[in-house]
Image (tube, rainbow, N blue to C red):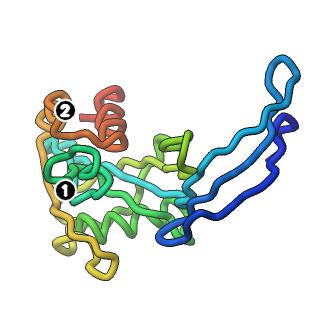
Amino acid sequence: MNNPKINIKNIKNLSDDWHQLNKVNFDQKIKNGTWINTDRECYITGNGACILLYNVKNKTVILTRQFRMPTYLNGNKEGMMIEVCAGLLDKDDPETCIKREAEEETGYIINKPKKVLEVFTSPGAITEKLYYFIAEYNSAMKINKGGGLLSEDEELEVLEYNFDTALKMIDNGEIKDVKTILLLQHLRIKDIL
Protein backbone atom coordinates (compact mmCIF):
# COMPACT_ATOMS: atom_id res chain seq x y z
CA MET A 1 0.00 0.00 0.00
CA ASN A 2 2.05 2.87 -1.30
CA ASN A 3 -0.39 5.25 -2.98
CA PRO A 4 0.34 8.77 -1.64
CA LYS A 5 -3.21 9.83 -2.57
CA ILE A 6 -4.76 7.29 -0.18
CA ASN A 7 -4.61 7.52 3.62
CA ILE A 8 -6.40 4.73 5.49
CA LYS A 9 -7.82 6.18 8.71
CA ASN A 10 -9.61 3.21 10.24
CA ILE A 11 -10.53 -0.40 9.54
CA LYS A 12 -13.49 -1.77 11.48
CA ASN A 13 -14.30 -5.48 11.35
CA LEU A 14 -18.03 -6.02 10.73
CA SER A 15 -17.98 -9.81 10.46
CA ASP A 16 -15.44 -12.60 10.77
CA ASP A 17 -17.46 -15.69 9.99
CA TRP A 18 -16.59 -17.52 6.75
CA HIS A 19 -14.40 -14.59 5.67
CA GLN A 20 -13.87 -11.08 7.00
CA LEU A 21 -16.07 -8.13 6.16
CA ASN A 22 -14.35 -4.85 7.00
CA LYS A 23 -15.49 -1.24 6.85
CA VAL A 24 -12.57 0.90 5.72
CA ASN A 25 -12.54 4.65 6.32
CA PHE A 26 -9.99 6.49 4.20
CA ASP A 27 -9.02 9.87 2.83
CA GLN A 28 -8.46 10.15 -0.92
CA LYS A 29 -6.83 13.05 -2.73
CA ILE A 30 -8.84 13.74 -5.90
CA LYS A 31 -7.73 15.47 -9.14
CA ASN A 32 -8.35 19.03 -7.94
CA GLY A 33 -6.09 18.44 -4.92
CA THR A 34 -8.92 18.18 -2.39
CA TRP A 35 -8.95 15.38 0.13
CA ILE A 36 -12.28 13.56 0.55
CA ASN A 37 -13.22 11.07 3.26
CA THR A 38 -14.94 7.84 2.22
CA ASP A 39 -16.17 4.60 3.78
CA ARG A 40 -16.13 1.31 1.85
CA GLU A 41 -17.00 -2.20 2.90
CA CYS A 42 -14.48 -4.80 1.72
CA TYR A 43 -15.03 -8.53 1.84
CA ILE A 44 -11.66 -10.21 2.51
CA THR A 45 -12.03 -13.61 0.86
CA GLY A 46 -8.50 -14.67 0.06
CA ASN A 47 -7.34 -15.49 -3.45
CA GLY A 48 -8.39 -18.41 -5.59
CA ALA A 49 -7.75 -20.33 -8.77
CA CYS A 50 -9.95 -21.84 -11.46
CA ILE A 51 -9.36 -24.19 -14.37
CA LEU A 52 -11.07 -25.25 -17.57
CA LEU A 53 -10.24 -28.81 -18.58
CA TYR A 54 -10.46 -29.47 -22.32
CA ASN A 55 -9.98 -32.44 -24.64
CA VAL A 56 -8.69 -31.53 -28.11
CA LYS A 57 -9.43 -34.92 -29.68
CA ASN A 58 -13.06 -35.06 -28.52
CA LYS A 59 -13.61 -31.26 -28.54
CA THR A 60 -15.08 -31.41 -25.03
CA VAL A 61 -14.75 -29.52 -21.76
CA ILE A 62 -15.30 -30.47 -18.12
CA LEU A 63 -17.56 -28.23 -16.02
CA THR A 64 -19.33 -28.65 -12.69
CA ARG A 65 -22.78 -27.80 -11.37
CA GLN A 66 -23.41 -26.80 -7.78
CA PHE A 67 -25.73 -24.75 -5.59
CA ARG A 68 -24.68 -21.11 -5.02
CA MET A 69 -26.66 -19.31 -2.31
CA PRO A 70 -25.86 -15.73 -3.45
CA THR A 71 -27.29 -16.45 -6.92
CA TYR A 72 -30.36 -18.03 -5.34
CA LEU A 73 -30.94 -14.88 -3.29
CA ASN A 74 -30.58 -12.81 -6.47
CA GLY A 75 -33.25 -14.55 -8.55
CA ASN A 76 -31.52 -17.70 -9.83
CA LYS A 77 -34.58 -19.96 -9.40
CA GLU A 78 -32.83 -23.15 -8.30
CA GLY A 79 -29.55 -21.56 -7.26
CA MET A 80 -27.59 -24.02 -9.41
CA MET A 81 -24.59 -22.75 -11.37
CA ILE A 82 -22.57 -24.37 -14.12
CA GLU A 83 -18.93 -23.46 -13.56
CA VAL A 84 -15.32 -24.37 -14.14
CA CYS A 85 -13.51 -26.08 -11.29
CA ALA A 86 -12.33 -23.52 -8.71
CA GLY A 87 -11.19 -23.09 -5.14
CA LEU A 88 -9.46 -20.89 -2.61
CA LEU A 89 -5.67 -20.97 -2.48
CA ASP A 90 -5.63 -21.37 1.28
CA LYS A 91 -1.86 -21.59 1.89
CA ASP A 92 -0.98 -23.02 -1.52
CA ASP A 93 0.41 -21.35 -4.61
CA PRO A 94 -2.13 -21.08 -7.48
CA GLU A 95 -0.82 -24.08 -9.45
CA THR A 96 -0.77 -26.41 -6.45
CA CYS A 97 -4.26 -25.23 -5.51
CA ILE A 98 -5.76 -25.84 -8.92
CA LYS A 99 -4.24 -29.31 -9.23
CA ARG A 100 -5.79 -30.21 -5.86
CA GLU A 101 -9.16 -28.69 -6.76
CA ALA A 102 -9.26 -30.41 -10.16
CA GLU A 103 -8.78 -33.79 -8.50
CA GLU A 104 -11.31 -33.10 -5.71
CA GLU A 105 -14.00 -31.58 -7.90
CA THR A 106 -13.65 -33.34 -11.26
CA GLY A 107 -11.71 -36.52 -10.43
CA TYR A 108 -8.96 -35.73 -12.95
CA ILE A 109 -5.24 -35.51 -12.12
CA ILE A 110 -3.78 -32.52 -13.93
CA ASN A 111 -0.01 -32.38 -14.36
CA LYS A 112 0.70 -29.22 -16.34
CA PRO A 113 -1.93 -26.52 -15.96
CA LYS A 114 -1.25 -23.38 -18.01
CA LYS A 115 -1.95 -20.02 -16.37
CA VAL A 116 -3.75 -17.69 -18.79
CA LEU A 117 -5.13 -14.83 -16.66
CA GLU A 118 -4.82 -13.21 -13.24
CA VAL A 119 -7.72 -10.88 -12.40
CA PHE A 120 -9.57 -9.22 -9.54
CA THR A 121 -13.05 -10.75 -9.53
CA SER A 122 -15.18 -7.89 -8.19
CA PRO A 123 -12.83 -5.03 -7.27
CA GLY A 124 -15.54 -2.74 -5.92
CA ALA A 125 -16.31 -4.98 -2.95
CA ILE A 126 -14.11 -8.09 -2.80
CA THR A 127 -10.32 -8.36 -2.35
CA GLU A 128 -10.10 -11.69 -4.20
CA LYS A 129 -7.63 -12.17 -7.03
CA LEU A 130 -8.36 -15.21 -9.19
CA TYR A 131 -5.76 -17.14 -11.18
CA TYR A 132 -7.19 -18.66 -14.37
CA PHE A 133 -5.80 -21.90 -15.81
CA ILE A 134 -6.50 -24.29 -18.67
CA ALA A 135 -5.31 -27.88 -19.03
CA GLU A 136 -5.83 -30.80 -21.35
CA TYR A 137 -7.51 -33.92 -20.02
CA ASN A 138 -8.19 -37.43 -21.26
CA SER A 139 -9.91 -40.49 -19.83
CA ALA A 140 -6.63 -41.95 -18.52
CA MET A 141 -6.32 -38.96 -16.17
CA LYS A 142 -9.63 -39.75 -14.40
CA ILE A 143 -8.79 -41.34 -11.05
CA ASN A 144 -12.05 -40.89 -9.13
CA LYS A 145 -15.62 -39.68 -9.63
CA GLY A 146 -14.94 -36.14 -8.35
CA GLY A 147 -17.84 -34.20 -6.87
CA GLY A 148 -15.99 -32.22 -4.21
CA LEU A 149 -15.40 -32.90 -0.54
CA LEU A 150 -18.29 -33.45 1.83
CA SER A 151 -16.00 -32.22 4.63
CA GLU A 152 -16.06 -28.83 2.84
CA ASP A 153 -19.85 -29.02 2.31
CA GLU A 154 -19.33 -29.53 -1.42
CA GLU A 155 -21.72 -31.47 -3.60
CA LEU A 156 -20.84 -30.98 -7.24
CA GLU A 157 -22.02 -32.70 -10.37
CA VAL A 158 -19.24 -33.27 -12.93
CA LEU A 159 -20.36 -32.42 -16.47
CA GLU A 160 -18.73 -33.07 -19.83
CA TYR A 161 -19.92 -30.94 -22.74
CA ASN A 162 -19.06 -30.60 -26.38
CA PHE A 163 -17.21 -27.28 -26.70
CA ASP A 164 -19.74 -25.81 -29.17
CA THR A 165 -22.58 -26.81 -26.84
CA ALA A 166 -20.86 -25.04 -23.93
CA LEU A 167 -20.51 -21.87 -26.04
CA LYS A 168 -24.23 -22.02 -26.90
CA MET A 169 -24.98 -22.35 -23.18
CA ILE A 170 -23.40 -18.93 -22.69
CA ASP A 171 -25.63 -17.46 -25.41
CA ASN A 172 -28.82 -18.99 -24.03
CA GLY A 173 -28.06 -18.06 -20.40
CA GLU A 174 -27.44 -21.53 -19.00
CA ILE A 175 -23.85 -20.54 -18.15
CA LYS A 176 -23.82 -17.29 -16.17
CA ASP A 177 -20.56 -17.61 -14.26
CA VAL A 178 -17.93 -15.05 -15.31
CA LYS A 179 -14.89 -17.26 -14.74
CA THR A 180 -16.42 -20.00 -16.86
CA ILE A 181 -17.36 -17.57 -19.63
CA LEU A 182 -13.86 -16.06 -19.63
CA LEU A 183 -12.13 -19.42 -19.92
CA LEU A 184 -14.49 -20.76 -22.60
CA GLN A 185 -13.99 -17.56 -24.59
CA HIS A 186 -10.23 -17.87 -24.09
CA LEU A 187 -10.30 -21.31 -25.75
CA ARG A 188 -12.39 -19.87 -28.57
CA ILE A 189 -10.18 -16.79 -29.14
CA LYS A 190 -6.97 -18.85 -29.04
CA ASP A 191 -8.60 -21.41 -31.37
CA ILE A 192 -7.62 -24.24 -29.04
CA LEU A 193 -10.76 -26.32 -29.71
Mark positioned earlier in the residue sequence (2 or 1): 1
Which is nearer the eye, 57 or 103?
A: 103
Residue drawn at point x = 77 percent, y = 44 percent: 26
Residue drawn at point x = 27 percent, y = 51 percent: 73
Image quadrant in which you'd find residue 11: bottom right
Mark 2 Cα-neighbour bin, 10 Å: few <14, some 14–19, many ≥20: some
Which is nearer the eye, 36 or 157?
A: 36
Compared to residue 33, the image places residue 155 above or below, namely below
Residue 119 visible from this viewpoint:
no
Q: Is residue 83 left or right of residue 120?
A: left
Residue drawn at point x = 49 percent, y = 50 percent: 131
Mark 1 Cα-neighbour bin, 10 Å: few <14, some 14–19, many ≥20: some
Residue 184 in the image, given as x and y percentages of width and height: 29, 37
Compared to residue 14, the image places residue 72 above or below, namely above
Which is nearer the eye, 138 or 14?
A: 14
Q: Is residue 111 left or right of residue 149?
A: right
Q: Report the quarter where the C terminus lies.
A: top left
Q: Which mark is residue 167?
A: 2
Residue 52 in the image, given as x and y percentages of width and height: 31, 49
Between the residue at mark 2 and the residue at mark 1, the CA separation in whole angstroms equals 16 Å
Image quadrant in which you'd find residue 177: top left
Residue type pointed to by label 2: Leu
Find numbered disc 1 in the image and state the secondary structure of the residue it sits on.
strand
Compared to residue 33, the image places residue 23 above or below, namely below
Q: Mark 1 — residue?
A: 65
Residue type pointed to by label 1: Arg
Compared to residue 82, the image places residue 139 above or below, namely below
